[in-house]
Amino acid sequence: MPELPEVETARSAIAAAALNRRIVDVDDHDSYECRPHLPGEIRRALVGRTLTSANRRGKSMWCATSGTDHAAAPGPILGLHLGMAGRIFVVRADSTIVEGGDPIVGSHGELKPEWDRFTLFFADGGSLRLFDKRRLGRVRLNPPIERLGPDALEISAAQFRSLMRSGTAQVKARLLDQTALAGVGNLLADEALWQARLSPAKRVDQLQPAEVDRLHRAVRRAVNAAVANGGAHTGRMISERHPGGHCPRCHAEMRHGTVGGRSTWWCSAEQSL
DNA sequence: ACTCGTGTTAGCTG
DNA sequence: TCAGCTAACACGAG
């Protein structure tokens, strides 16, 4: 399920294969995926335009759109979010497919047609589909990108210190707060905290300056490794994130609990409070 | 039948 | 008003 690395593969698929193709029809019938828009609203806004860029910040993607034959002014921004299980399929004119997003398709690798929640149809016969079996993804016009914090791959040490300086939230909750830092999900948060040897339940106001900087480096390292290796599930401690799992460094037992409202695993020896 | 979940967010509370 | 927490959302997987 997509965190920053998986979303980047989806953005890359759109950038590689979906830009500058004329939109002739839009399937926006899924009123939950397209909330708060009404069915037909996104269709009317996009038909006759092309996507002109594919952008990402954290787990959010958006595409700028062109003017139409009748109005030269640029169209609305098309926001795309993969939610817990979204995947992007871009079908080229020659029927080849470029894809990205959630690597897990289904228990039997099935692609049920009803899991296509949103589709742009291009004049050349191809399409861009948001495939999402969980239906928690989201398509919206002019999404509120400004509410997102800095991207986890681009944040500076000074910015990271400042977002960890205020408040009393548990450090894992702060890492998951997309308005503070965009792109870290549940698995990457556990991986980064494990790399930094910090308890996920430690309050941010209890962190030493050296611990904050260590965590910043761990986040960057964990996200970069996940991008390079094909997803958040490739982290070093993720395979031990189950009952009976052991720390890959010291072999102590892994502990489980709820932190920041999410299922959380940490090393019982190295990540105590 | 029942629980869990790699995400987001409305609504409540202090 | 705001930071922080909880429940709810939809629905497949185990």
Image (cartoon, coloured by chain):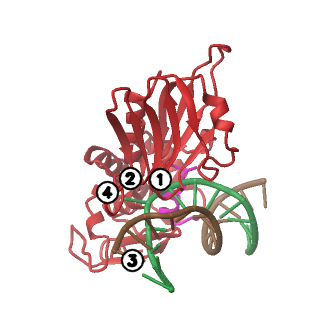
Chain colours: A red, B green, C brown
Residue A167: x %, y % from top left: 60, 60
Q: Pick the residue in front: A237 or A115.
A: A115
Q: Which residue is pictured at 44% across the width and 41% down the height? A: A156
Residue at image point 31% right, 33% down: A96
Asked whether residue A142 appears in the rendered view, the answer is no
Q: Which residue is mark 4?
A: A109
Query: In the structure shown, which secondary structural element does the residue marked by tag 4 occupy?
Result: loop
Identify the secondary structure beneath mark 3: strand
Chain letter, disc 2 residue: A
Whole-number angstrom distance, CA of label 1 to CA of label 2: 7 Å
CA separation in Å, label 3 and label 1: 32 Å
Which mark, residue A111?
2
Q: Mark 4 to mark 1: distance in Å?
A: 13 Å
Judging depth in this view, the residue of A238 and A156 nearest the camera is: A238
Which is more foreground, mark 3 or mark 4? 4
Instruction: Provide the chain ID for the residue under circle 3.
Output: A
Residue ID at (41%, 69%): A199
Left/right of residue A194 with respect to residue A121 in the rendered view:
left
Q: Quadrant of the N terminus of chain A?
A: bottom left
| Amino acid type, residue under disc 2 in the picture | Leu
